[in-house]
Image (spheres, helix red, strand yellow):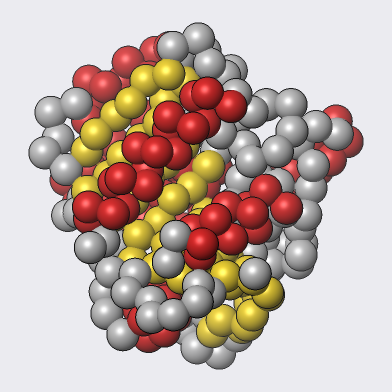
Amino acid sequence: MGAMEQVKSLSGDEEFLCYVARPDGKISAAIIVIQEIFGVNNGIRAKCDHWASLGYLAIAPDLFWRINKGTDLDADLPEEFQTAIDLMGRLDQDQGIRDIEAAIHFAQNAIGNHKVGCVGYCLGGRLAFMTACRTDIRASVGYYGVGIDGLLGEKQAIAHEVMMHIPTADGFVPADAQAAMHAGLDDHPKVTLHDYHGLDHGFAAEFGQRRDDEAAALADSRTEAFFAEHLA
């Protein structure tokens, strides 16, 4: 359903690739799908295709393009997992937010309005929270975002709705970090947190060993309802 397309950087003097899935018929809203550390792989492309099947323009920017263009890794292969960890350590996340903002502008121009949301996974869950704090994105969803407890100082900048999916047995987000997220965000009028008891990081991956079908279906149904409400 989708294909890789060139998108102008925020500065306008460079271009980078995004996977873009376009629905049939008129498009009234768009969703930026923010990659895990594994790049714009088959799982992220499949998520874009799914959003397009629901009528959204879906765009997944290649956030590693400055350090490793075309990253497409498998989380179930140990050497590729380690490559992904190394790439994450080299990513300039502030620059990554600027690239996400460029994708937002691309989406806004394509649909002719500001009804653009984002959904991110793992690293993308963290970047979705940062996007909510730093851009005019209209709705943001983060799945098992890492290090959110260290970003709570930015929460006052959140202007539009945010939803976060938190597996309680996440090996990358310890219990004290989860507790800090709840303490810092439970009373925020724009933020909703959902806990998934006993589940680990990556439970909503589209493919592979990490996926938990039942929990993924629940989280994804909540995300679909969230966007249906806030991007209407």
Q: Give the residue at x 37% y 47%.
A: 224
Q: Is residue 72 left or right of residue 168?
A: right
Q: Where does the N terminus fall, quadrant-wise?
A: bottom right
Residue 36 or residue 42, whichever sits in front:
42
Q: Residue at x 26, y 74 (%)?
A: 114
Tally of numbered tags: 0
* View extreme (front): residue: 25
The x, y position of residue 11, in whole percent, is: 47, 84
Residue 97 in sight in this render: no
Q: In terms of depth relative to the viewer, which is nearer, 29 or 25?
A: 25
Residue 66, position in %: x, y? 68, 68
Query: As rendered, which of 18 and 115 lies closer to the eye?
Result: 115
Q: In the rendered image of this protein, does residue 114 appear above or below residue 182?
A: below
Q: Quadrant of residue 84?
A: top right
Residue 7 appears in the rendering:
yes
Picture residue at 58% right of the left edge, 72% below the top: 20
Drawn side of residue 35 relative to residue 110, left or right: right
Displayed quadrant of residue 197: top left
Percent x, y for residue 219? Answer: 42, 33
| Place of residue 124 in the rendered image (x, y in percent of width and height, measured from the top left) | 52, 47
Q: Give the side of residue 71 with respect to residue 136, left or right.
A: right
Residue 16, above or below 184: below
Q: Residue at x 22, y 20 (%)?
A: 183
The quadrant holding residue 14 is bottom right
Q: Quick check: 216 above or below 31?
A: above
| Quadrant (top left/top right/bottom left/bottom right) for the C terminus | bottom left
